[in-house]
Image (spheres, rainbow, N blue to C red):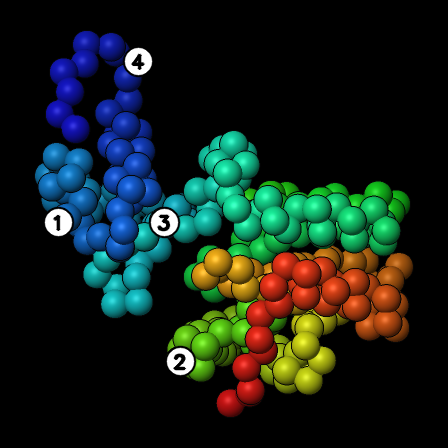
Amino acid sequence: MTQDRQDRQFVDALARGLAILECLSRAERAMGNGDIARHVELAPSTVSRLTHTLTELGYLRRSEHGRTYELTPKNLTLGYPLLIGMALRDRVRPHLEDICERSGQTLALAIRDDLHMCFVDVAQGSAPRAIRLATGGRLRMAVSAAGIATVAAMSERLRWSTLNRLRGDILQREENAQIFEQALEACHRLGYAMVRNAWQEGIGGIAVPIFWQGTLATLSMPVATNEVSAQRMHNELAPALLAAADAIGRAAINAPE
């Protein structure tokens, strides 16, 4: 990335950070600072500072072994056109719009981003009190229906390690772990996750896991709990999500530990 630029308006640090994101977007595997430094032709110390900054900002995350980096879904927020070519989004979008139109509620496609869920596509509901979501927004797995549904559909090994981290995070935040555990147990029984007032008073959600072309994601519907009863969530909204998931490719929910 060695370039001789005379433009005083050109910000080298920004260009270097973007070069790292571009490098990782082309990589077929997670990369360490040394590999990145060789590809972008920067000093390892410079790359180390940049990857640390990008990780703190949420654009990179450390791999399972902690010595390499990979992109996070937050990069989708840098440009909506990136989402246009996303095959999963294209497949799911008609179902989001259909349920949104019939229910008046907001629908979202969510995928995991470390211990968060990232909303990569959103169909905004028309109901007066429909919950608004932003494309690229993130919500903690432990307090979201999307996160609970994702955990329930994980492979046994990945679910074990993720649960350990989630439980540790809940403990560190001094939150009520029973809410999470009960919602996860119910998801195994029902085939969908449902929460009410877990993240914030007055907000709940339903989510069903889907699996398509190697990607685990969820169809998620946030609701205002003072407007939408638990009975309606179970009897009307959850079946609509389940039917859509069946049409797309519903993910199997594995047996609990």
In three-dimensional space, the C-alpha distance between marks 2 and 4, rounded to whole angstroms, equals 49 Å
Q: Nearer the viewer, residue 117 or 213?
A: 213
Disc 2 or disc 3, which is closer to the eye? 2
Task: Give neighbour class at mark 1: few <14, some 14-19, many 20+ (Cα, 10 Å).
Answer: some
Disc 2 target residue: 157
- Return the x and y of residue 159 as percentages of the image width and height: 46, 77
Q: State the mark number for residue 9.
A: 4
Residue at 55% over, 87% down: 256
Query: Between disc 1 and disc 4, whose residue precedes?
Result: 4
Residue occupying the far front of the picture = 247
Disc 1 target residue: 34
Q: Vertically, is 250 above or below 103?
A: below
- Amino acid of disc 1: Gly
Which quarter of the rendered picture does the N terminus lie within?
A: top left
Left or right side of 124 for 182: left
Q: Vertically, is 90 above or below 243?
A: above
Query: Between disc 4 and disc 3, whose residue precedes?
Result: 4
Task: Give neighbour class at mark 3: few <14, some 14-19, many 20+ (Cα, 10 Å).
Answer: many
Disc 3 target residue: 71
Residue at 63% over, 59% down: 248
- Return the x and y of residue 170 as percentages of the image width and height: 52, 74
